[in-house]
Amino acid sequence: MNTRISLTGLKFFKHAAQSLSFKTASEQLFVTQAAVSQQIKSLEKSLNVKLFERLNREVVLTEQGKQLLPFVTKGFDAFEEGLKSLGDDPNPDLLTITTLPSFASRWLMPKLIDFQEKNQGIGIRISPSLKIESFSENKLDLAVRYGLGDYPGYESHLLQHDYLLPVCHPKLIDPDKDMAEQLANIPLLTDEGVDIEQAWRPFIEKTGIAINTRPSKLHVGDSTMLIEPLLCRQGMSLLRFSLVYELLAQKQLICPFPFYFQSGYSYYLVAPENNFKYPKIQNFHKWIKAEMQDLDTQWQEFSGGKLQEITINLDNG
């Protein structure tokens, strides 16, 4: 037997064997009847067996043909199922999201109950990570990232711009004393995010405000870990408005001087292109977009024309 068996020959055999008609097979395959006959002859030669008895006005399967048919049918059914699955969601009832730990804990997690109430058939799994994780092996569905929107190999959708501003505990500032002197003595707490790490010195230069730039003993990898020290009056930090707007509204933190900037970084939904066809991701996209519109409303109410924007160009990180 020739081990190089033609898939085309097997496909033609399947159609002819199921209909017991070369003519019907040719119509189904949009080829001539002679082409069907030639493919099956080549297949019989390769297998070194006779698959059909050719009678005057019909064909019938030989015993070998009857033996082969269910395996060929099962094989092509598997091919079709596999090809179809490329566009299907392998886990339609579970949405797995990776995002920054700060965004997950300070913004996303408290709001997810609303999404779940509106989509009760979908479970949520959050995978916090400072780095973009791989979408291989269908372990992740979607990422919410904070960056420039350029994620090679993936599709990205802009969700919302964010604003960076200095914040500290209100007890650290006495409005009756000299502001410059107070700022010079407040420790600067920093995280290692690229938008923050490169921002302080140009921020100081642009505003002309003397801030305590002596090296702090507290450096963290993610900005959410700075919030508790800020609430404990340990210093001042530069943070994204999305992480602290509720604390600002409650007067637990304040913006000690009226400047802010946009680093060029924004929130994006990121995933392989095909994932955005999944109903669960379409539902989540619509939901989070609406929720982030409220963030913009909060910013307009907070800034109220009282804060001055400064321009700082950061490197792409």
Image (tube, rainbow, N blue to C red):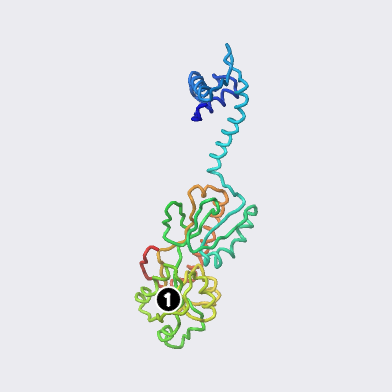
Residue sitting farthest toward the front: 1
- The quarter in which the C terminus is drawn is bottom left
Considering every residue shown, the one lying at the far bottom of the view is 177
Q: Position of residue 69 (x, y in %)?
A: 60, 27
Point 43% across, 55% down: residue: 151
263 relative to 139, above or below: below
Residue at disc 1, secondary structure = loop
User: Which one is in front, 282 or 306?
Assistant: 282
Give the x, y percent position of residue 276: 51, 49
Residue 219 image offset from top left, x and y in percent: 47, 75
**190 to the left or right of 25:** left
Residue 1 lies left or right of residue 181; in this view the side is: right
Farthest-out residue, top: 56
Residue closer to the observer: 103 or 65? 65
Up the image or down, 129 lies above or below 171; here it is above
Residue 113 lies left or right of residue 273; in this view the side is right
Other residues around mark 1 within 10 Å, as few (<14) / some (14–19) / many (≥20): some
Image point 57% across, 21% down: which residue? 51
| Residue 84 figure quarter | top right
- Spot occupied by residue 285 in the image (x, y as percentages of width and height): 53, 54
User: In the rendered image, which residue does mark 1 sit on?
Assistant: 258
- Labels in figure, total: 1
Question: Which of these two is toward me, 153 or 254?
Answer: 153
The amino acid beneath tag 1 is: Pro
The residue lying at 59 percent from left, 58 percent from top is: 125
Tell me which corner region of the image, top left, top right, bottom left or bottom right, holds residue 75: top right
